[in-house]
Amino acid sequence: MILGLVDRRSQREPAAVLVVAAPWSTLAGLAGAVGPADWLVDVVLVDDEAMAGLNLAYRGAEGPTDVLSFSYLGADGPGEPGVREGARGARRDLWFEPDGGGAGLPLLAGEVVLAPRFIHERCAQRGWAPDREMALLVVHGCLHILGWEHETEADRRAMRDVEAAVLRGFGLPHPLAEGQEP
C-alpha cells in the first residue's frame, strides 16, 4: 500500500509532530508490506477532540483513542474481488468501487486516523517508545482496512501474529506481544 499523509489538526504541537515525523520512511515501508502495492491508505492526523467525536460516532466510546480505521473496500461486489482472502494480508475477499482510484490514480482503500497528541501523552505516561507505537498503529490500521478485526480472542491472536510478522520484517518487535511494551 502507498501511504499518504493528511493533517487535519487545528494545532500542531511540536511533540505531536515528532511522534509522526520520526519514523515516516519506516511507516511507509510497513504500509507497503501489506495490501496491494497500488492501493493508497491515508494517515489522517486529528486533534484529540476530533478523535473523541469519531470514537463516539463510530464505536460508541467516550473520549479520544489512538487509532481508528475506515475501509473503503467492500466485503462483496460484482465481478472478481480486488484482492482475494489471504493475498497481501487480506482477511477476506475485498472489492472496491470501479472509479475508486480515478483516472490513473491509486485506489484510496481507506484511512488510518491517528490522534498524535493522545498517542504522545500516552507514550510519555507509560514510558513507551513513540516510534514503535506508531509503527504498530499503522500496521494495525492497515490490517483493519484489509478486513481484520479483533472482536474475539482468536481474532486478536491472529491479528497480532500478522502484525508481529510485518514488524519483524522491518527488524521491529511487536510492542504488545509477549509482554513487551511499545
Image: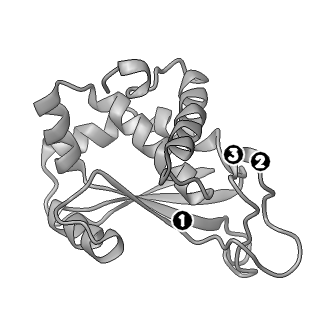
Query: What is the tally of numbered marks visible in this picture?
Result: 3
Residue at horizontal 25%, vertical 55%?
65
Q: Amino acid at mark 3?
A: Gly
Query: To which quarter of the image does residue 154 belong?
Result: top right
User: Compared with residue 112, is residue 130 higher up or lower down, i.e. above or below?
Assistant: above
What residue would you read off at disc 3?
A: 89
Tell me where residue 106 appears, x and y as whole percent: 67, 64
What residue would you read off at disc 1?
A: 110
Q: Nearer the viewer, residue 16 or 174?
A: 174
What residue would you read off at disc 2?
A: 86
Tell me where residue 129 appears, x and y as whole percent: 27, 25
**Residue 168, disc:** none
Q: Amino acid at mark 2?
A: Gly
User: Compared with residue 163, is residue 113 higher up or lower down, i.e. above or below?
Assistant: below
Query: Horizontal placement of 89 versus 108: left or right?
Result: right
Query: Horizontal placement of 78 versus 132: left or right?
Result: right
Tell me where residue 81 appears, x and y as whole percent: 82, 68
Mark 3–mark 1 Cα distance, whole angstroms, equals 15 Å
